[in-house]
Amino acid sequence: MKRHHLIAGILLAVCLVAVVLFVDSISEVDAQQQDKEQDSYTEREVFRNDDVVFRQIDDHTWEGNGHLVYNETLYIIEGNDRALLVDAGTRIADLDKIVAGITDKPVTFIATHVHGDHTGEAVKYFPVMYLNAADTVNIPRVMPDYKGELRYLTDGEVIDLGGRLITVLFTPGHTPGSITLMDPAAGYGFSGDAFGSSNLLLTMNFSTLLATCRKVDDYMTSHNIRLLYPGHYHGNNPETHQRVKDMATISREMLSGERKGEPNPGGSMGLNRIVTDYGVRINYNENAVE
């Protein structure tokens, strides 16, 4: 009798595991389908392989999407004399050769910040990396084997690509050394994860984010910047000027106590709280409001 009960128990456990695996697989498929449905690219595709898809924003600008971390995005910004590669994705084999097939200009590699989905394995193809020195704190964890030379940017410096001037703004919040690149003549910029592509992971505090939002708001106003291409671009989620203003409002209200966040169980990177409004989510640590 006990043996029958044991067999029945084993069969029940197997059935439960099968159900859980089935539900998990359905959930994963649903999530993938939702991501696919959310993608809405209008840019013309110019390159595709198993690691990355590149699309053309305009005659001298391209965006590339990896497939491993929420469509991690990199950009090629071309001038008359040279080009910038902004970020390197998570894992893109032969990225240097892919970029050389899109632009024939000498390429300078610049990182918006040091995280694995922006300075992943492909950084090894570039002997020099430009970045904000404040993000070197993440190098030992994220890219300890990088053998290239690090060169440091300054806040407000202008990079001349030949007929195209790109301004560097330090925009900390997501990381200490996050930057945003502005192209005033084109009317847009490239913000990495500074504003989160609608889902910001705020590893610093709301005071820092508020200062960043005000700084970028001022720049967008004075230079007529209409949008920022983010670090996880789906074709329909550029950072707008209004979003920057809204995130400033959230930050100000969080600091004053007018607004309260909610628990964020299982939040990565110690971000155990979350606040959601204006179509954005800000994940933060409870100490970010002190």
Image (cartoon, rainbow, N blue to C red):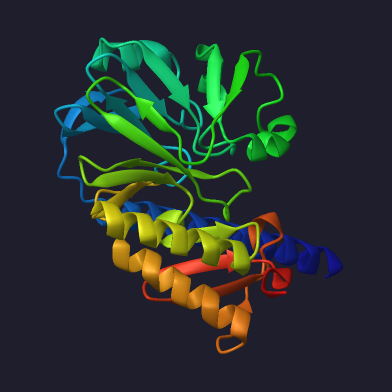
Q: Quadrant of the N terminus?
A: bottom right
Residue displayed at 46% across by 32% down:
89
Which residue does the image show at 48% across and 68% down from the upper left?
A: 281
Compared to residue 94, the image places residue 117 above or below, namely: below
Q: Nearer the viewer, residue 50 or 157?
A: 157
Q: Is residue 73 among what the camera can see?
A: no
Q: Is residue 97 left or right of residue 175?
A: left
In front of the other: 243 or 30: 243
In the image as oriented, which residue stretches furthest toward the bottom? 258
Query: Camera-side residue: 180 or 70?
Result: 180
Question: Is residue 263 placed above or below 113 in the rendered structure?
Answer: below
Point out residue 285 in the picture as x, y percentages from the top left corner: 69, 67
Quadrant showing the C terminus: bottom right
Question: Measuring 46% from the left and 71% from the top, which residue is drawn there?
Answer: 248
Give residue 25's position: percent from left, percent from top: 47, 54
Q: How many marks?
A: 0
Q: Is residue 74 above or below residue 174?
A: above
Q: Quadrant of residue 107?
A: top left
The image quadrant that residue 37 belongs to is bottom left
Residue 252 showing in the rendered view: yes
**Relative to 63, 231 lies left or right:** right
Provide residue 204's location: percent of width, then percent of height: 65, 58
Q: Position of residue 262 (x, y in %)?
A: 60, 80
Q: Is residue 268 left or right of residue 158?
A: right
Looking at the picture, does residue 58 appear above or below residue 201?
A: above
- The foreground one among 215 and 109 is 215
Residue drawn at point x = 42 percent, y = 68 percent: 280
